[in-house]
Amino acid sequence: MNLGNLIKVAINALKRNKMRSFLTMLGIIIGVASVITMLAIGQGSRKSIQDQIASMGSNMLFVMPGNMRMGGVQQGSSVSQRLTVKDVDAIEMECEAVTAVSPEVRSSGQAVYGNSNWPTTIYGGNEHYLEIKSWKVVSGRNITDTEAKSSAKVCLVGRTVADELFGEGVDPTGETVRFKNIPFRIIGVLGEKGQNSFGQDQDDVIIAPYTTVQKRILAQTHIQSVQMSARSAEESALAQSQVEEVLRRTHKLREDEDNDFEIRSQEELSTTMTSVTEILTILLGAIAGISLLVGGIGIMNIMYVSVTERTREIGLRMSIGGRSVDILLQFLIESILLSVFGGLIGILVGFGASSIVEALTSWPISVMWGSVILSFAVCTVIGVFFGWYPARRASGLDPIDALRFE
Amino acid sequence: MKAIIDIKALKKDYHVGEVTVHALRGVDLEIRQGEFVAIMGASGSGKSTMLNIIGCLDRPTEGTYLLDGVDVAGMSKNESAMIRNLKIGFVFQSYNLLSRTSALENVELPLMYNPYVKAKERRERAIASLEAVGLADRMDHMPNQLSGGQQQRVAIARSLVNDPVVILADEATGNLDTRTSYEIMSLFQELNRKGKTIVFVTHEADIARCMTRNVVFRDGHIIKEEEITNRLYAAEMINALPVEEE
């Protein structure tokens, strides 16, 4: 029998048992749809985390004080005063993979304007600080080099602070706000960033020159961290090792001493954060994959029943000239059709489910074409694999016995 | 008339565990074109084995078998399948129609296995075949919408559709009541009159009397061969039946 006729015969056989064919396909439909949806959700959540991390800064690296020993006593990292502006200068001078570097000092306190007040955090940086942290200035201007060095009492405010002190959407540029009783002239307003992945409001900030925060608010000479941009995401690791080298020298650490600082990169953070979702995606995908496998076994089961039930039909087909290979192909094509049709419907359902999840979670969910192609290929393989054994059994029947089968 | 079936010294042994069963112990049989032969015998006499071998469903252990001049005794399974498709038409006791498949599609089935017959020709020949058995008005009916006699007519149409050199009927009237079995026999006689060669396994004496020759098997041998001189005609037998009360 030629292929066209075989497909026709197989379709007719499936049509004779519409309900059963549909139920058999259901296993594959659910399997494929869940694989596609799970992978799309995983991809979506990963992308959303990556977007949020990207909003924190551009190819950002930062140095935090680490554990250290002081006269034999192990000190916690928070009391360390080892990072200074000298480190910042050294990094700026020597590390060619670092394009921008800024000290960071911060203090929490109450910001006051007129009779409104609002608890917030003030961050001190230099003129590169906004660029490193991917802040945009929507109104006014950035801190200048001179202001950064000369403890100027100027600041930029985040949208939340502006809203709370001055009212929704008001542009407070030129006004003066008091933070811990120090008056700051507002020279600009920062663009909105929204919440970060920990649910923290990133717009609840005031940014001022680091010298101002250091001297006028904190009265200290050390800094809390160093913030940097690497030239590119790829050179992040290179920048990290250059910075480590410079800091070990400026901190006069001996060969056998541990670092008294820690360097973290955005890359690392991104990898850590996404590795969780990756594991979750793999897990969900694996569970979905198992349901696909179970769907395949369902096909095998039904094909098996079908072969037994249609033994006389097989005998008849053989007696009127069907060769073993014709019978084998007929049943194999039936099972492939079941799995491929099921796969196609499953892909559609998967797309539908993904867009429902997208609407519910507002994650940027995108169905991966790779997963569509993969599930489709898996379906075809399942059809052949699970159809083979029953089809083989059918084609091996003896026509005389098959015709006499009750 | 030329010989359609030419069997010489045919033996068939089955091995059931340790025991060897001699189903056929040396049979010579020649069936010429246009004959209508009844194969008779008790169960276990070898008549079913004989039919299976004639139908190329089974291969003899020894002996020669020429079907339409071709040696089919030593053919491979695939070659036998092709011979069955092109030269043989089967009619079974239990019809063996595909359920939930129209009469027309059932009749088309053998031609599906013939790669040289295209869809259009297949349909035309199936229609012609159904017309020949008097079911032109039942072509789209499913088997469960047809009576037993009508189902057997569909099966006969199916056996005719590839224009075989011989029709093999295995107790084709066994499942039918007397009147219907005479009707079916009348159809067979009609086909035979038009030149079809038919081999018909039966154990009913009156049905066997409708044919041109009877061959009786016992214990793997042909014990009696008889040309029927005072042949019965099924059409007349129907008229002789008592009128059915409504």
Image (cartoon, coloured by chain):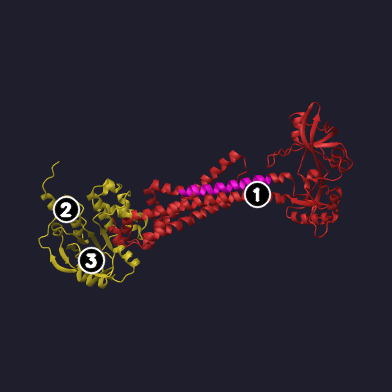
Chain colours: A red, B yellow
Tell me whether circle 2 and circle 3 mark residues in contact (CB < 8 Å).
Answer: no
> Residue B66 versus residue A319: which sits nearer the camera?
A319
Label 2 vs label 1, nearer the camera = 1
Please name the residue that numbered disc 3 is placed on.
B50
Mark 1 neighbour density, 10 Å: few (under 14) some (14–19) many (20 or more): many
- Distance Cα–Cα, label 2 vs label 3: 25 Å
State the image coordinates of residue A168 (x, y, percent, origin top left). 73, 29
Subunit under mark 2: B
Residue at disc 3, secondary structure: helix
- Residue type at mark 1: give it: Thr
What residue appears at the point 59 percent right and 49 percent down from the top-left corner?
A281
Considering only order in the chain, which callout, 3 or 2, is on the residue closer to the N terminus?
3
Which SS type dominates the magenta stretch?
helix
Magenta range is A27-51
Residue at disc 2, secondary structure: helix
Please name the residue that numbered disc 1 is placed on.
A274
- Left or right, A62 with respect to A5, comes to right
